[in-house]
Image (cartoon, rainbow, N blue to C red):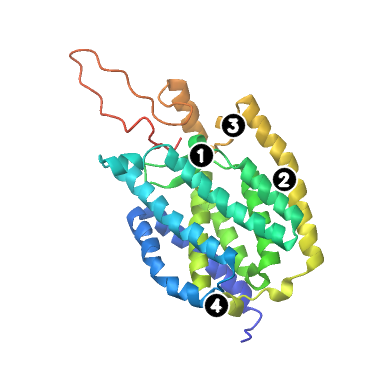
């Protein structure tokens, strides 16, 4: 089925806006968000019908995005509601941050392996660099208990840009007809934190837009090739040049990233805007530790009222 040329740009704009609205809905409604992804598992029969059994990448991508979104939803509930049971206390430990970090790491690694498989080696180098330079899970990933339990990740602008151009190049090579729709989810993830004026919401925007996009592709495989087919945009020489560009710009970023860690500047440099100000103030006042977590208050003197109890020492509750 052929659609008029004007349908593609209009559908791309509409899809990008819808994805940003979806992300905001998911951010505000942490319980509903988790259950949406739980219920989405009933569409697995459609995945079986529409995804070839030997397409390891598509199956790995779906499972490594949808299932972790459910896990992330549990973490958001634990962070906001502060339930005092063994399970919910466990879900507030620092290891949960490392799981989130590991999930994103694995998603990048999957696509990087596919790049190697396709021979797009310089773009694969960019993917490897993204894995190496992703901010550590314990210090730079949080659940924000002051709001809706959002996942906060203190990535820097260059990491976000490299991720966007790397992923766009990957899809350009791997699924030509889906390139236009992929540009929409990448644009939505970039624009959402800018609109919200909260740069630490980039990963939140990325995971929810990607999850929604993968579900649509798996359930309605002809949707995007029909309304925004970009197969004709593919040029192998441009793909090779794009991958080369991504690999080259990633190299100096590795040195900058390592320098920030080596000099101890990363704690401040990776945070931006209000999050940086809150972190600096908390550190100056001694109310938060190097991980950005609350410092346990000293025991009150005799006869003085006791301060409210803080969450577990391994909790991950603050936005700073």
Q: Residue at x 64, y 83 (%)?
A: 4
As rendered, which of 270 and 95 lies closer to the eye? 95
Q: Residue at x 63, y 41 (%)?
A: 133
Q: CA distance from mark 1 to mark 2?
A: 21 Å
Dot 1 or dot 2, earlier in sequence:
1
Residue 137 marker = 1
| Residue carrying label 2 | 250
One can see residue 220 in this view:
no
> Could you tell whether 43 is left or right of 195 in the image?
left
Element on which disc 1 rests: helix
Residue 223 marker = 4
Q: Residue furthest front?
A: 54
As rendered, which of 42 and 234 lies closer to the eye? 42
Nearer to us of marks 1 and 2 is: 1
Does residue 5 lie above or below 287 as drawn?
A: below
Cβ–Cβ under 8 Å for marks 2 and 4: no
């Amino acid at each position: 089925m052929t659609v008029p040329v004007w349908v593609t740009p209009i559908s791309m704009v509409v899809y990008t806006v819808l994805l940003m609205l979806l992300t905001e809905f998911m951010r505000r409604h942490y319980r509903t968000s988790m259950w949406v992804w739980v219920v989405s598992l009933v569409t697995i029969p459609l995945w079986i019908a529409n995804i070839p059994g030997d397409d390891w990448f598509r199956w790995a991508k779906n499972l490594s995005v949808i299932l972790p979104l459910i896990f992330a939803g549990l973490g958001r509930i634990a962070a906001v509601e502060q339930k005092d049971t063994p399970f919910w206390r466990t879900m507030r430990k620092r290891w949960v941050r490392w799981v989130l970090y590991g999930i994103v790491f694995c998603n990048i690694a999957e696509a990087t392996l596919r790049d190697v498989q396709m021979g797009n080696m310089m773009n694969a180098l960019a993917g490897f660099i993204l894995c190496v330079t992703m901010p550590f899970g314990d210090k730079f990933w949080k659940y924000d208990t002051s709001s809706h339990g959002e996942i906060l990740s203190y990535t820097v602008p260059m990491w976000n840009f490299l991720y966007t151009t790397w992923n766009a190049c990957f899809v350009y090579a791997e699924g030509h007809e889906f390139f236009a729709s992929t540009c929409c989810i990448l644009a939505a993830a970039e624009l959402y934190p800018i609109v919200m004026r909260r740069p630490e919401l980039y990963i939140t925007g990325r995971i929810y837009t990607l999850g929604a996009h993968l579900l649509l592709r798996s359930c309605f495989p002809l949707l995007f090739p029909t309304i925004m087919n970009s197969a004709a945009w593919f040029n192998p020489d441009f793909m090779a040049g794009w991958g080369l560009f991504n690999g080259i710009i990633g190299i100096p970023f590795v040195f900058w990233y390592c320098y920030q860690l080596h000099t101890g500047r990363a704690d401040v440099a990776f945070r931006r805007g209000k999050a940086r100000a809150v972190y600096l103030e908390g550190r100056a006042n001694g109310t938060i530790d190097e991980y950005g977590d609350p410092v346990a208050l000293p025991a009150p003197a005799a006869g003085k009222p006791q301060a409210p109890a803080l969450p577990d020492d391994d909790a991950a509750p603050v936005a700073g």
